[in-house]
Image: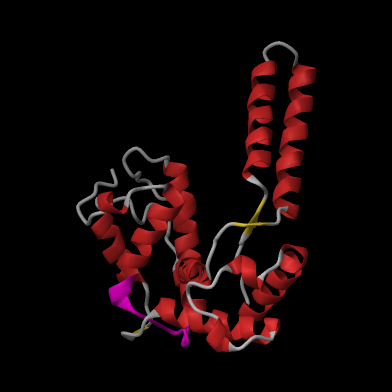
């Protein structure tokens, strides 16, 4: 769909990220539309020009925090002054009621937050089992297929029932909202702040593709 690649990064990972970008900013790329985009700066400019909404200079991450804080105070019945960007999620969302509370928060916001994951040792074990099962296919296809089914099913179940928080603070959740649900996090979803789009994209590429922000310059080559 988007025929370019970030150097030393899997092109499929970039494509997956750009699908999220489309959803977050309410845009859509046509087939081969980005084929002539050569640098990260050109990509940022292209996306900014693609967003056909009114421009305002207000801060989206701040609005996301206020929106999240209002939902948290309503659901958790706490004073809004008790919630700051540095407030620990684990203090607000005790493990025994975490899933229920997050479902309520997501319903109030109108979009998924995807804050929970299984313990890292569980996913590491299941991924190693999957790798071992693939290798064992060369020796016993029955054993290999059985192991693959067990590991894939285990990963699906682990992520479905996982109860570990993927982020630590309320501020980090607000930043995640700004990246993944940009328009829905704004007070007026029919507007955007052109000046902050590049920063949001830098954060997103760095977070999802594990790229050092210092390497995401406007001159960074995409092809």
Q: Based on the displayed image, in which of its 4 quarters is residue 45 positioned?
A: bottom left
Left or right: residue 93 compared with residue 82: right
Q: x, y percentage for residue 117?
A: 65, 53
Residue at the (68%, 35%) spot, across then down: 126
Q: Give the tally of numbered discs.
A: 0
Q: Where residue 112 appears, x then y in whole percent? A: 62, 68
Visual colour scheme: secondary structure
Q: Position of residue 89 (x, y in %)?
A: 59, 68
Which residue is found at the position 46% from the left and 46% from the top? Answer: 13
Residue extending furthest toward the top: 139
Among the 4 quarters of the image, the one containing residue 113: bottom right
Lateral position of residue 119 relative to residue 180, left or right: right
Residue 8 in the image: state x and y as whole percent. 34, 37
Q: Nearer the viewer, residue 175 or 3?
A: 175
Q: Nearer the viewer, residue 43 or 107?
A: 107
Instruction: Write the residue at 34% across / 70% down.
Output: 197
Region rendered in magenta: 186-196
Location of the C terminus by quadrant is top left
Query: Compared with residue 48, is residue 11 higher up or lower down, i.e. above or below?
Result: above
**193 in the magenta segment:** yes
Q: Is residue 28 above or below residue 208?
A: below
183 part of magenta stretch: no
Q: Is residue 163 left or right of residue 13?
A: right
């Amino acid at each position: 769909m988007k025929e370019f690649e970030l150097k030393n990064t899997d092109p499929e990972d970039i494509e997956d990220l750009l699908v999220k970008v489309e959803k977050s900013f309410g845009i859509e790329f046509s087939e081969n539309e980005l084929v002539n985009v050569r640098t990260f700066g050109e990509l940022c400019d292209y996306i900014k020009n693609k967003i056909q909404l009114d421009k305002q200079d207000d801060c989206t991450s701040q609005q996301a925090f206020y929106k999240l804080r209002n939902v948290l105070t309503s659901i958790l019945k706490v004073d809004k002054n008790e919630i700051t960007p540095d407030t620990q999620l684990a203090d607000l969302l005790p493990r025994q009621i975490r899933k229920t509370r997050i479902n309520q928060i997501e319903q109030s916001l109108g979009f998924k937050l995807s804050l929970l994951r299984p313990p890292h040792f569980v996913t590491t074990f299941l991924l190693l089992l999957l790798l071992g099962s693939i290798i064992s296919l060369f020796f016993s296809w029955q054993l290999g297929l059985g192991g693959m089914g067990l590991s894939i099913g285990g990963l699906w179940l682990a992520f479905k029932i996982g109860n570990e928080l993927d982020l630590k603070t309320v501020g980090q959740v607000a930043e995640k909202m700004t990246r993944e649900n940009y328009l829905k996090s704004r007070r007026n979803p029919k507007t955007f702040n052109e000046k902050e789009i590049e920063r949001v994209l830098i954060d997103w590429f760095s977070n999802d593709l594990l790229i050092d922000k210092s390497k995401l310059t406007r001159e960074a080559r995409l092809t």
